[in-house]
Amino acid sequence: MGKKDREERVQERESFYEKRQKTQFRNKAIAIGILAGIVAVLGISSYNFYELSSHVLPKGMPPGSGPLGGIHIHAGLLVLIYGQQFDFTSTAYQLKSPYIHFEKGNGETVHMHAANVTMGFLFGTLKIGLDDKCFTFPDQRTFCTNDKYTLKFFVNHHQVPDMKDYVFKDQDRLLISYGNENDTQINDQLTRVDGLKLIT
């Protein structure tokens, strides 16, 4: 009997240690899982913050600009490709820089919040290439002056050779037009720009 009791006690002890080890292992696994979850959440949050910062705040100040918040002025902008208006109301083009941007789901009013910010900087924040000959969208569609079509720029009805370095004044009306329009069609486009209702 004594030997059997001893064996039962040994088995109970081993069973107790096994249960305790399993419980400790389970607790460690849960703790590691929770820790991994926290690390994942922090990683995702950091990545999202970086992405948001890099989209909302472009790297560095615009060259030669004044202090952010120093001014708040507006201009109307119309971009027409073969007579069709390009839509800047998409979130892909809204509030990409605190210095100069479209906002509130409006794609016709450009807001400038620091002096001396160029239109080239605006388009750069939208990942749109702009020079005196070509207009290049993020999907690599390119509209360049050639034998059939021309890229034209107008500021308050006056044609200008380029708009990349242009710093607009309050209430300016800007037109970028690509196509083979005649003078009458261009005048119609300029009238459309005049009719834009700017938001503030």
Image: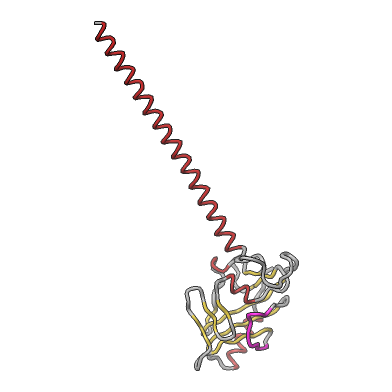
**Highlighted magenta segment, given as a residue range:** 158-166
Name the residue at 50% across, 73% down: 138
Specify the color scheme.
secondary structure
Residue 185 among those drawn in magenta: no
- Report the magenta stretch's main SS: loop
Residue at the far right in the pictured view: 70
The residue lying toward the viewer, choosing from 67 and 88, is 67
The residue lying toward the viewer, choosing from 162 and 22, is 22
Residue 47 sits above or below residue 191 on the image = above
Name the residue at 59% across, 59% down: 53
User: Number of callouts in the render?
Assistant: 0
Q: Is residue 195 left or right of residue 30?
A: right
The residue lying toward the viewer, choosing from 88 and 18, is 18
Residue 164 among those drawn in magenta: yes
Name the residue at 43% across, 34% down: 28
Expressed as whole percent of the image width and height from the top left, the position of residue 33 reads 44, 40
Residue at the far top in the pictured view: 1
Expressed as whole percent of the image width and height from the top left, the position of residue 165 reads 66, 80
Expressed as whole percent of the image width and height from the top left, the position of residue 187 reads 62, 89
Name the residue at 55% across, 72% down: 127
Expressed as whole percent of the image width and height from the top left, the position of residue 67 reads 74, 66
Quadrant of res 88? bottom right
The residue lying toward the viewer, choosing from 100 and 195, is 100
* Picture quarter with the N terminus: top left
* Picture quarter with the C terminus: bottom right
Quadrant of res 2? top left
Residue 177 sits above or below residue 110 on the image = below
Residue 21 sits above or below residue 197 on the image = above
